[in-house]
Image (cartoon, rainbow, N blue to C red):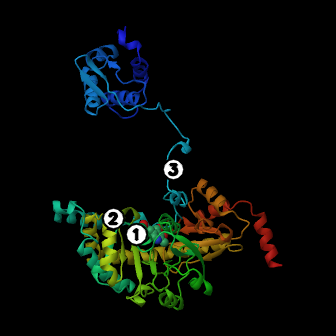
Amino acid sequence: MLNQWSHMSLSPILAQWVEAADTAGLTRQQQLYTLLKGAILDGRLAAGYRLPSSRQLAVDYRIARNTALHAYQQLLAEGFLVADRGGTRVAGLMPVQPQPAVDCDAARHPRLSQRAGRLQLRQGEAVLPFAPGLADLNAFPWGSWARQLQRAWGEVSARQLAYAAPGGEPMLRQALADYLRGRRGVLCSPEQVFIVPGAQLALDACARLLADPDDTVWLEEPCYPAARTAMTAAGLRIVPVPVDAEGMAPAEGLWQQRPPRLLYLTPAHQYPLGAVLSLERRLEFLRRIGDGWIIEDDYDSDFNHSHPNRPLPVLQGLNPEAPVIYVGTFSKLLYPGLRVAYMVVPHWAVRTFGEAVESLYRAGQAVEQRALARFLEGGILTRHARRMAPIYQARQLCLRDSLLQAFGRVGRICGGAAGLHLSLLLPEVRDDRAIVRRAAELGVTARPLSEYYAVAEAAANGLVLGYGMADVARIPELVARLAAATGDDARLDALHKAGRQ
Ligand SMILES: Cc1ncc(COP(=O)(O)O)c(C=O)c1O
């Protein structure tokens, strides 16, 4: 039999507790504390309400005295309860509104900024063959990486557990400057190299620090969606500029009508269609950028399939004085979860842009950066890239052949000079988002090409297919599944026949 206080407000609250199973992974004491705090906050236990003594509570609810005591002590310490000579009572808190347990009505809560509302939300993707943007995570050199990490941990002191050196660990900046000069033709000194946690953050930094809200940014159309996200989040005005076989192709008048403050390019392998920006256009962009900035996203050129031993030089290397921010990432060569990327800044902007980046973000990952520097210095990364290049090339060839067989009549394959993906253009009668949904049900991940466009009416229809994770032995069968996911072929056949007549 419960005591006289129990018929008051506390009884139904604790009854819930006694009935509930311990599913939340909380201790009994944490559960009691949470329950009482919730009841105080939503007004079920009113200010001034007297609680039974911890001893009494323990007896009535058959719980350990310590459970009650510790829950009370925590609530006393946080100011939800007060103790006086009469015992323990609920503190006189600010008036609170009773709240429903679950409130899904977003209109009742403060909204995000208008800019956030315009973002293209990221679709989570399974790590399955044909997921774009992924290297072969199974081929990652675990052993060497673990050894370098262990060595780096042995070298660092407590000082390096604080924020890392601005711009990154000097040894990584040095190693990267050498690597980029040798492999990519980037002309830079170590001071110009800034290590950042991911190319995405580099794009965010460029959008926020090189342009002001309402400034104009030219983006390739179609474009890497997360680049659009970074520009949108910074409040920039996006001008989608179509791409052709030579990369971004602005109409002549655009330079006068809407000159870019920022110009975002993926020159080595346009993302996602795969064009290589011609030398003529590279020179033209450098000549006409004026007082704007070019962002050169060199995201996947570690694997150059057209010229494995003579990769295309970068745009930055054509004129190291030009206002070009060169961005690269280790996400494709190693793994995206590493979150290490870099920006190369013109020497004349090292102080201004560098200081702005440092004040906006905090540097970390000193240990990973040291391990990475050894990976570069010791040639482990280059050996890994050399080992993977023919594997990826074989995967691309196999994917190409399989796509030609399955879709050759109606589809067109684009890209492949570098990187880890191909795009397949499909006729408009196909809804690429529906194909992708059906493919997912069949265990194949692909991305709809139409999602890469800013202007829906201009969007081409197709699939973006990563082959980094796709084993040659499985590719033909996976493509067959993709073909099955394109479904009813009657209209495609009709289209094909019409094309032949
Ligand atoms: C074109 C392009 N730029 C940048 C990135 C982002 O790289 P990170 O993982 O370093 O943010 C990606 C990732 O897929 C990409 O495809």
Residue behind mark 3: 111
Task: Give the mark nearest the N terminus, 1 or 2.
Answer: 1
On-image quarter of the C terminus: bottom right
Task: Give the mark nearest the N terminus, 3 or 2.
Answer: 3
- Whether residue 435 is visible here, answered yes or no, is yes
Report the mark closest to the observer, 3 or 1. Answer: 3
Looking at the picture, which amino acid does disc 3 mark? Arg
Q: Is residue 53 left or right of residue 111?
A: left
Q: What number is the disc on residue 361?
A: 2
Could you tell me residue 493's position as x and y percent?
Answer: 78, 68
Q: Element under label 1?
A: helix
Task: Give the mark nearest the N terminus, 3 or 1.
Answer: 3
Looking at the picture, which amino acid does disc 2 mark? Tyr
Residue behind mark 1: 205
Q: What is the C-alpha distance between the residues marked 1 and 2?
A: 9 Å
Q: Between 22 and 316, which is closer to the camera in this rendering?
A: 316
Q: Quadrant of ligand 1?
A: bottom left
Q: Element under label 2?
A: loop
